[in-house]
Amino acid sequence: MKKAIKIILWVILGIALILGGLFAGFVYKVKNGFPVFYETDIPKIDFPANQSAILLFSKTSGFRHGGSIEASKKVFAEMAKKNNWFLYETEDGGVFNAEQLAKLQTVIFNNSTGEVINDEQKKALENYVENGGSLIGIHGAGDNSHHWPWYVQNLTGAEFSHHSLKMPFETTAILTDNQADSTLVLGINKDWKRADEWYVFLENPRQKGFDILYTINGESIDPTANIPLIAPNKNFGMGKDHPVAWHKNTGKGKTFYTSMGHDETAWKDENFVKLIENGIKWAIKE
Ligand SMILES: [Zn+2]
């Protein structure tokens, strides 16, 4: 009997050690980036002469928002058809080279998380944007898993702190900022509410020179409920002025980011889809 108890205790200890090890590994990866494969072969793309070319990049090496990514593809395809855009959808980072980037009117990081392109490809994208290109980021594209200072400085403007783990997602009003005349808010209902996974940032991008398009009242949601062990320096609340969509001119180019878009419901939300469409039109200067 005693022996049996001993065996059980050892088994429990063993399981606890394995689980602890796995958790520690996960925390390490969240903090330092997930290992990733970089594609360096240049893909064959036939860019049509008379259409704006848009790159929809959905590669992930961090958290994968599979539902949102899959739902978005159909919506982007319809949007491209309607606006006569050439949409190139890929998860292959080989496209991030100066020659092919120069043929693109905009690049969309579609819930793209983690370190998805190598240093040379990052540099090519930075040069592309600063010389007149544009970069759009959706939701997970701002989750700080990219380990890329230029990207934070020029796309998200602030480092991601965390998101509330409160389930189900909280519904709150999406408030227009002082941009009523902006083409970016055209056709979007003023009375807009949605439930999403609200990202909290360490600083307010407004203070970093970004033009804020939409905010939520940060006091209308519960911004806590993160995993306390990996959250020593978190911002538990951005206050009333909690931006959820913003943009900026970067060099001769432009950047636009929205923290909304966690799941497939976003792509059924006409206002969200309109915001993305407006964002693309603004980015490609149509
Ligand atoms: Zn999410």
Image (cartoon, rainbow, N blue to C red):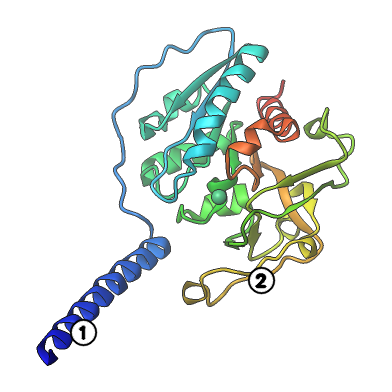
Is residue 255 left or right of 173 when viewed as pictured? left
Residue 252: tell me if it is visible.
Answer: no
Q: Nearer the viewer, residue 77 or 127?
A: 77
Q: Quadrant of the C terminus?
A: top right
Q: Judging from the image, what secondary structure is the residue with disc 2 in?
A: loop
Q: Judging from the image, what secondary structure is the residue with disc 1 in?
A: helix
Is residue 160 left or right of 242 when viewed as pictured? left
Q: Residue at x 58, y 7 (%)?
A: 50
Name above or below for residue 45 compared with residue 25: above
Is residue 185 left or right of 8 when viewed as pictured? right
Q: Residue at x 62, y 61 (%)?
A: 166
Q: Nearer the viewer, residue 189 or 244?
A: 189
Residue holding disc 2: 236
Q: CA distance from mark 1 to mark 2?
A: 39 Å
Crowding near pointer 1: few (<14 within 10 Å), some, many (20+)?
A: few
| Image-quadrant location for residue 266 | top right
- Where residue 23 appears, as percent x and y from the top left, is 35, 68
Name above or below for residue 115 compared with residue 242: above
Q: Nearer the viewer, mark 1 or mark 2?
A: 1
Label 1 amino acid? Leu
Q: Residue at x 38, y 34 (%)?
A: 93
Residue holding disc 1: 9
Q: Quadrant of the N terminus?
A: bottom left
Q: Nearer the viewer, residue 134 or 82?
A: 82
